[in-house]
Image (cartoon, helix red, strand yellow):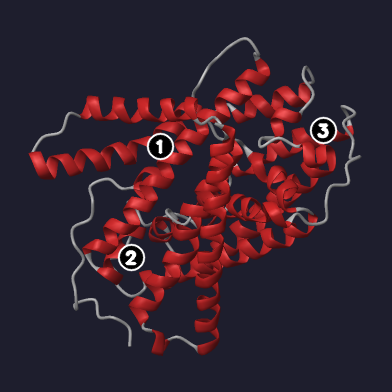
């Protein structure tokens, strides 16, 4: 039996939360199908595009199947979040789902993983920006945050291969078991948009079409990710860098277009990642001390990301760590756990229960092995 909405009322929503910061104009439930698709694509398309060829080099050609499997699983868990929202009309965000399933501790648990993921992604932006600026200006040391525009980057890489003479001469490996956990972590990172899915659904005028939005977004992004992975791996093989833009020939127009596109929205995207983290800390301090030094907190949060980015400037390993430790939990495991808790195992079809159990078991295994492999890589590079 589904849990009653009156059994345990939701606690007041946070004034600002992660999903509110990532989706514009979410408070008006009048977003069209096209606009929601655009927002969904924006949530799923990010810096993972630059590391996807590296992920394929870590796992080998056969691991490309895992990319599609991860995409299908994450699309399914996105649908589970939509079902969870139907259990109570007051559920509007991911933390609301956690609270409805497990009470206040559920909200805290979900929020902590969301904010930690945002914090580490912001650090990744700084590393990405620094690496690509160093590619353009080797003697200049600059650090800011960024995100890529997927289609332009893919087209620029394709241009470098077909027009600028890089070619598709690399064969690559069929399978690389030793680095497969790293590849899985990076693949999962590419589909880490679940934090904003509930807000996207809430913002729709016709919420019944959200499942179609998810399907369209995942198919489009998977085609884009798959294309970039194949292009980059054919071009550079096992020598591909953790950011494929760093492999592009220096001085070519296509290389400059790809890199400049990577640097288009650094400040705004970095702010979107950091602001919810700083706000959560401020709200916590206000609850305890009735006051919060806003400027000091935000300055310290920003400074800490810069220090960590300078100390651990390993983009691929950091993205793999985020994917293995956080994205798998937020995008795969928590939706399954909340769904089972809200509706009860006895009310879920046996086939679906088996599927969910398989996702949880596989997610746990990948999270453990991937986190270990990523931390090991980071430590060895220090």
- Mark 2 and mark 1 lie on one chain; the one further toward the N terminus is 2
Q: Residue at x 23, y 25 (%)?
A: 296
30 or 44: nearer the viewer = 44
* Disc assigned to residue 97: 2
How far from the left and from the top, in percent, is residue 263?
58, 26
Q: Which quarter of the image is occupied by the C terminus?
A: top right
Q: Residue at x 60, y 44 (%)?
A: 48
Position of 371 with respect to 274 (left or right) is right
Q: Which is more toward the observer, 82 or 283?
A: 283
Q: Position of residue 317 (x, y in %)?
A: 58, 41
Q: CA distance from mark 3 to mark 2?
A: 44 Å
In the rendering, at what x and y percent does residue 231 appear?
80, 43
Q: Which residue is mark 1?
A: 272
* Number of on-image labels: 3
Q: CA distance from mark 3 to mark 1?
A: 32 Å
Badge 3 vs badge 2, beta-carbon distance below 8 Å: no
Q: From the viewer's side, name the closer residue of 370 and 146.
A: 370
Q: Which residue is mark 3?
A: 159
């Amino acid at each position: 039996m589904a849990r009653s909405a009156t059994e345990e009322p939701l606690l007041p929503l946070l004034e600002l939360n992660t999903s509110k910061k990532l989706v514009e104009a979410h408070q008006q439930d009048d977003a069209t199908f096209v606009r929601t698709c655009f927002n969904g694509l924006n949530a799923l398309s990010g810096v993972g595009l630059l590391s996807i060829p590296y992920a394929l080099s870590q796992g080998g050609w056969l691991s490309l199947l895992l990319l599609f499997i991860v995409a299908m699983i994450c699309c399914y868990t996105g649908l589970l979040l939509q079902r969870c929202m139907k259990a109570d009309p007051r559920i509007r965000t991911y933390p609301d789902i956690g609270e409805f399933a497990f009470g206040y501790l559920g909200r805290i648990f979900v929020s902590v993983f969301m904010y930690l993921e945002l914090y580490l992604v912001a650090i990744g932006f700084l590393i990405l920006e620094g690496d690509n600026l160093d590619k353009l200006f080797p003697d200049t040391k600059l650090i800011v945050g960024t995100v890529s525009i997927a289609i332009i980057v893919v087209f620029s890489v394709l241009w470098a291969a077909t027009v600028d003479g890089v070619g598709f001469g690399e064969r690559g490996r069929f399978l690389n078991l030793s680095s497969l956990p790293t590849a899985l972590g990076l693949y999962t990172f590419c589909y880490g948009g679940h934090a904003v899915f509930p807000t996207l659904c809430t913002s729709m005028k016709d919420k019944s079409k959200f499942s179609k939005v998810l399907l369209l977004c995942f198919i489009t992004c998977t085609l884009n990710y798959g294309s970039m992975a194949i292009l980059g791996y054919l071009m550079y093989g096992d020598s591909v860098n953790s950011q494929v833009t760093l492999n592009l020939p220096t001085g070519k127009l296509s290389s400059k277009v790809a890199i400049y596109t990577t640097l288009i929205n650094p400040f705004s995207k970095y702010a979107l990642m950091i602001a919810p983290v700083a706000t959560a800390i401020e709200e916590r301090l206000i609850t305890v001390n009735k006051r919060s030094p806003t400027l000091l907190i935000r300055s310290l949060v920003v400074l800490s990301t810069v220090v960590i980015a300078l100390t651990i400037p390993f983009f691929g390993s950091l993205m793999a760590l985020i994917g293995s430790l956080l994205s798998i939990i937020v995008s795969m495991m928590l939706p399954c756990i909340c769904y089972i808790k809200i509706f009860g195992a006895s009310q879920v079809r046996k086939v679906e229960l088996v599927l969910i159990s398989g996702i949880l078991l596989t997610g746990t295994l990948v999270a453990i092995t991937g986190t270990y492999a990523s931390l090991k890589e980071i430590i060895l590079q220090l």
